[in-house]
């Protein structure tokens, strides 16, 4: 009977060890996964900050001769001075057409 108890204890001990090792493996996996996920989020926010740090978005009206103006607040924030070369991406929002009659 003593032998039967030892076999049960060995089986129970082996089962507990297997559960502990499984739990430890899951814990390590989650640590690694969390680290990878955190790195990905940091990279995303770094890229997003870079895109918004040196850029501005504003609406302006096209003036005569096709000129547009950069508002003073944006010029100051981006340290744009007269004569600086800037890149402009134009996205029409609303088209204002003068009423012209064909005769």
Image (tube, helix red, strand yellow):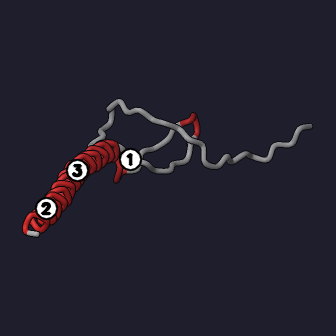
Q: Residue at x 12, y 65 (%)?
A: 9
Q: Residue at x 64, y 49 (%)?
A: 94
Tag 1, which secondary structure? loop
Residue 34, image x and y in percent?
24, 53
User: Is 86 located above or below residue 91 in the figure?
Assistant: above
Q: Earlier in the sequence, mark 1 or mark 3?
A: 3
- Tell me if I can see residue 86 in this picture: yes
Say few, some or many: other residues with alpha carbon within 10 Å of mark 1 (under 14 / 14 to 19 / 20 or more).
Answer: few
Q: Earlier in the sequence, mark 3 or mark 2?
A: 2
Q: Residue at x 7, y 68 (%)?
A: 2
Say few, some or many: other residues with alpha carbon within 10 Å of mark 3 (under 14 / 14 to 19 / 20 or more).
Answer: few
Residue at which label 1 appears = 56
Pointer 3 and pointer 2: residues touching (CB < 8 Å)? no
Q: CA distance from mark 2 to mark 1?
A: 74 Å
Looking at the rendered image, the disc whose residue lies closer to the viewer, 1 or 3, is: 3
Q: CA distance from mark 3 to mark 2?
A: 33 Å
| Label number found at residue 7 | 2
Tag 3, which secondary structure? helix
Most extreme residue toward the right is 103
Work out which quarter of the rendered image holds the C terminus and state it. Answer: top right
């Amino acid at each position: 009977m003593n032998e039967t108890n030892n076999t049960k204890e060995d089986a129970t001990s082996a089962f507990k060890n297997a559960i502990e090792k499984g739990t430890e493996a899951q814990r390590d996996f989650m640590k690694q996964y969390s680290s990878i996920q955190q790195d990905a989020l940091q990279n995303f926010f770094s890229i997003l900050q870079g895109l918004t740090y040196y850029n501005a978005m504003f609406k302006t009206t096209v003036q005569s001769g096709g000129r547009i103006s950069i508002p003073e607040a944006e010029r100051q924030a981006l340290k744009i001075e007269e004569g600086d070369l800037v890149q402009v991406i134009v996205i029409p929002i609303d088209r204002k057409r003068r009423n012209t009659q064909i005769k």
